[in-house]
Image (cartoon, rainbow, N blue to C red):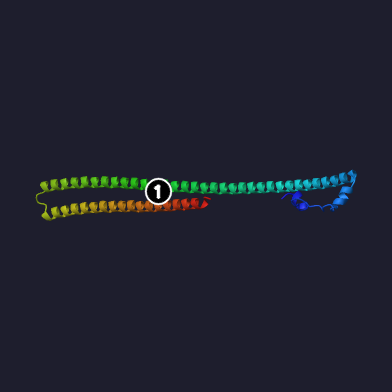
Amino acid sequence: MTSREGAGPKKTFGTRHPASPKIPAMTQAALSPASRDADLDAALTLARAEVRDLQRTVTVLREALESAHADARAAVARAEAASAAEIAQLKATATALRDELEARRLEREAALQKAHADAAQEMAQLKATAAALREELEQSAAQSRLAVTRAHTAGQGEITQLRNTAASLRDALERAAAEKETAVQRAVLELSAENAQLRDTVQALRDQLEAAGGRAKP
């Protein structure tokens, strides 16, 4: 409401002025033309005053309507601005969460690849070690056979002991390789379980974001 509306008196639709006293018919007939002109002027003045009152009332109502329209437009603009700000904030939060999840996923993948590379490298080293030991054992066996051939007098017990030693070394190498392979498989399984848990966490966050987006919609 404008200051003009608040300060001004309340207007009514058509201010009624006191009507002129009725003049008996005989008296009116007896009036002179000058008196009739005066009565007509008075009636015209009253009509003009009533028209001015109606015009002022229309002006006040028009100003009140324009003020109401302006208030409504301002309220709509404020609501749209608040909604746009909230949507922008939600988008920024979703983008930040998506970036963080992507960074964690990349870190997990890099860690898994490194674990696989380390396991492959360690298995290669174990294979190389086993091959070297096997070669060494073969050389030792060959030397033993050569020694047996050269020394027929060597006892059967020494030959048996050498065979047992070779078998023990072979068993030890096989057990070491099996234990290492088991450890590598366990590490791979743990990384796979952790990756699955991360995917579940990502899905839960995505569901929460979608639910928050649904509540934010008008």
State the residue in front, 32 or 52: 32
Tell me: 74 left or right of 97: right
Count every numbered label the image shows and give the total.
1
User: Pointer 1: residues within 10 angstroms few (<14), some, or many (20+)?
Assistant: some
Q: Position of residue 124 (x, y in %)?
A: 29, 45
State the residue in front, 77 or 69: 69
User: Measuring 40% from the left and 53% from the top, which residue is drawn there?
Assistant: 200
Tell me: 19 left or right of 186: right
Tell me: 65 left or right of 150: right
User: Measuring 35% from the left and 51% from the top, which residue is drawn there?
Assistant: 192
State the residue in front, 164 or 91: 91
User: Measuring 31% from the left and 51% from the top, which residue is drawn there?
Assistant: 184
Q: Position of residue 165 (x, y in %)?
A: 19, 53
Element carrying mark 1:
helix
* Residue beneath disc 1: 108
State the residue in front, 74 or 141: 74
Tell me: 151 left or right of 12: left
Q: Position of residue 107 (x, y in %)?
A: 42, 47
Task: Look at label 1 and name its amino acid.
Answer: Arg
Q: Position of residue 215 (x, y in %)?
A: 50, 53
